[in-house]
Amino acid sequence: MGATINDIAKKAGVSLATVSRVLNNSGYVKEETRTKILDAIKDLDYTPSAIARGLSKNEVNTIGVIVPDITNSYFGEIIKGISEVAEEQGLNIVLFNTDDKLEKELRALNVIKEQRLRGVIMTPIFGGDDFNSQYFNTIESLSMPIVLVAADIKYSTFNGVFVDNIKGGFEATNLLIKEGHEKIAIITGLLSSERAIHELIGYKKALTLNNIRTRDEFIFKGDYKLDTGYKITKKILSMEDKPTAVVVCSNMMTLGCVKAMLEEHKKIPEDLSIVGFNKLEFLDMVGINLTYVEDSPIELGKAAMTMLNERISGKAINEVKRIRISPTIILNGSEKIKK
């Protein structure tokens, strides 16, 4: 553990207030005393906290970023977009990973509030039909600019940058229908999130418009995790009346899906056609080319940080701004039907 201001004061034989005046270059301090304090700082190898310095001046130059899974390359790209714009604006980032757990998200929000950061960009966990008063009260008590990215919170009107996930779910399913598939499964995200709900709405809409019956046994509830995609795909492959295609609503679940296919010595798309969500560079590197819905996470991050900076700088502070980006489909052949 590093040295503290108390350690410096003790070593220099002065008060905490005198040390504070030297650290913040404020108020009069005798040159002899200043030299003692600076020598103590050097001897103790003291590094002042940027947050502590900022708090003393009421100008913390740091924002909080909350994501549900830091190991997922999709959120890594969102963070990259945020950091590129933040660096241009001279802002620092404190990153929080929630592991898709509501209690961790609440804890992160409370830490951000305690440290009085300049603002927060977050991909929320909660967004479903259940109203959670503790969750909403925590967010509303932050008293700082908030920008949501990639996922919305139902019943809220926070500023945010989102994806048209109904269109994403529709386009992925409609593509498979155009290829001749009628038995199409979906592995959803967490249905407590509005994103996953919207993707499922898009899936059902495509089936209905093409006069294909929605089959409950083809709707699999996932959670964006690799292991879930793997287990569900194993189940799909073992079904007696199995689907010929599947829409997989996250890149990590798609990776799990591919893992299960390889283990079962099944081929894509001959044994099961797949349309995933978001790019997985690892699959490209090993020669597995999957068709996927692309929503440009780096651009999402850049747009979210630009929006937050507008609020921090006082521009359009009373205007609610909500941008919705339209996804595109990148065709790589995994949507084809078995001939």
Image (cartoon, rainbow, N blue to C red):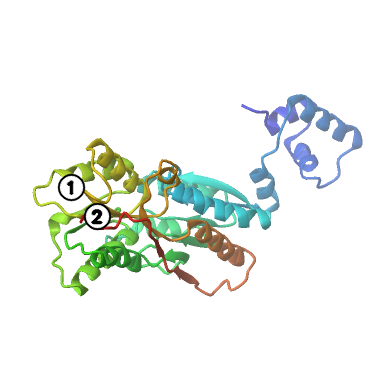
Front residue of 154/284: it is 284
Residue 136, image x, y percentages? 39, 60
Name the residue that disc number 1 marks: 236
Residue 10 lies, in percent from the top left, at 74, 26
Q: In the image, is 17 to the left or to the right of 185?
A: right
Residue depicted at x 69% and y 31%: 6
List the residue tagged with mark 2.
246
Badge count: 2
Residue 195 position by quadrant: bottom left
How packed is label 1: few (under 14 Cα within 10 Å), some, or many (20 or more)? many
The disc labelled 2 sits on which kind of residue?
Answer: Val
Left or right: 93 in relation to 216: right
Per the image, label 1 sits on a secondary structure element best described as: helix
Quarter of the image containing the C terminus?
A: bottom left
Q: Residue at x 20, y 42 (%)?
A: 234
Q: Residue 127: where, in percent of width, then height?
A: 34, 60
Residue at the location (27% across, 51% down)?
Answer: 269
**Along the horizontal axis of the image, is 292 left or right of 267?**
right
Is mark 1 in CB contact (under 8 Å) with mark 2? yes
Q: Is residue 255 visible?
A: yes
Local packing at callout 2 (Cα closer than 10 Å; few below 14, some 14-19, many 20+) is: many
Instruction: Residue 99: give x, y in percent of width and height.
Output: 39, 43
Q: Is residue 23 above or below residue 84?
A: above
**In the rendered image of this protein, does residue 246 appear above or below residue 34?**
below
Give the Cα separation between the discs numbered 1 and 2.
Answer: 9 Å
Amino acid type at circle 1 is: Ile
Q: Residue at x 73, y 36 (%)?
A: 16
Which is more N-terminal, label 2 or label 1? 1
